[in-house]
């Protein structure tokens, strides 16, 4: 079976899809979508809450959104391990909102590196401008080539950082040294450490995640 685009949070710093999609064969269909879409707008934000996805072996492999997790549950490819007290009502049924789900079939996580994407760079840098150190919504951040592209700087994990528009403007086609800016930290690829840490950060508010992440 072929792997999808690797994207979000993976305990081994490997390939995992972005929140909102998960590495499950045949899980891309819209079975269950009608249930989810029939939710009242009041529940819309609840549907974006993060859900920890475990492999069949209970190893944490990803973080997805409630909406996506519900589809996996309704399709029968995953089961809920932990749930919130809240319920969502579809046309015929009430469903407990999942907090942690587990895939029923073991999913091999391919040994390929995480996709270099804007989303993953922002995730690595925790939406923090690496020059002024302020946190911004994703829409107010851009990617900066530390060594400018015009001077041979590559688009790589080591040369791309999250940057606010103001700092990006200030820096222009210069190196940080030339522009009198200092990097908050040296940019690196995702690692096992980074991924697990990110999962913990995302799951910080939810006690139910602890036993799967803190061991
Ligand atoms: Zn900045």
Image (cartoon, rainbow, N blue to C red):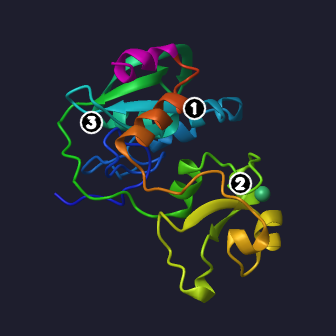
Q: Is residue 15 left or right of residue 188?
A: left
Secondary structure under tag 1 reads loop
Q: Badge 3 is on which residue?
A: 77
**Beta carbon at label 2 within 8 Å of ligand 1:** yes
- Determine whether label 1 and label 3 are within 8 Å by CB: no
Front residue of 190/58: it is 190
Q: Badge 1 is on which residue?
A: 49
**Residue at figure coordinates x 66%, y 49% from the top left:** 127
Mark whose residue sits in front, 3 or 2: 2
**Residue at figure coordinates x 30%, y 28% from the top left:** 102
Residue 73 location (% of width, % of height): 35, 31
Inter-mark Cα distance, 3 to 2? 39 Å
Q: Badge 2 is on which residue?
A: 129
Q: Is residue 134 left or right of residue 205?
A: right
**Label 2 neighbour load within 10 Å: few <14, some 14-19, many 20+:** many
Q: Compare marks 1 and 3 and give the one earlier in the sequence.
A: 1
Which residue appears farthest toward the top when viewing the image? 85
Q: Compare marks 3 and 2 and give the one earlier in the sequence.
A: 3
Residue 65 location (% of width, % of height): 51, 38
**Label 1 neighbour load within 10 Å: few <14, some 14-19, many 20+:** some
Q: Compare marks 2 and 1 and give the one earlier in the sequence.
A: 1
The magenta stretch is 207-215
Quarter-of-image position of residue 104: top left
Q: Is residue 138 left or right of residue 57?
A: right
Inter-mark Cα distance, 2 to 1? 25 Å
Mark whose residue sits in front, 1 or 3: 1
């Amino acid at each position: 079976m072929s792997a999808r685009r690797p994207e979000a949070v993976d305990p081994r710093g490997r390939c995992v899809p972005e929140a909102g999609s998960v590495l499950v064969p045949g899980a891309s269909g819209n079975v269950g979508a009608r249930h989810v879409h029939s939710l009242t707008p009041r529940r819309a934000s609840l549907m974006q809450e993060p859900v920890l996805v475990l492999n069949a072996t209970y190893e944490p492999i990803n973080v997805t959104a409630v909406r996506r997790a519900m589809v996996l549950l309704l399709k029968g490819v995953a089961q809920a391990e932990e749930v919130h007290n809240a319920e969502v009502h579809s046309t015929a049924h009430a469903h407990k909102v999942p907090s942690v789900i587990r895939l029923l079939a073991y999913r091999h996580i391919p040994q390929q590196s995480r996709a270099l994407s804007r989303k993953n760079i922002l995730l690595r840098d925790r939406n923090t401008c690496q020059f002024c150190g302020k946190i911004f919504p994703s829409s107010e951040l851009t990617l900066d080539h530390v060594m400018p592209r015009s001077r041979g700087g590559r688009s790589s994990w080591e040369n791309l950082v999250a940057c606010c528009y103001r700092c990006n403007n200030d820096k222009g086609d210069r190196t940080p040294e030339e522009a009198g800016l200092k990097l908050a930290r040296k940019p690196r690829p995702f690692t096992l450490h980074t991924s697990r840490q990110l999962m913990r950060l995302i799951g910080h508010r939810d006690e139910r995640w602890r036993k799967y992440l803190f061991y």
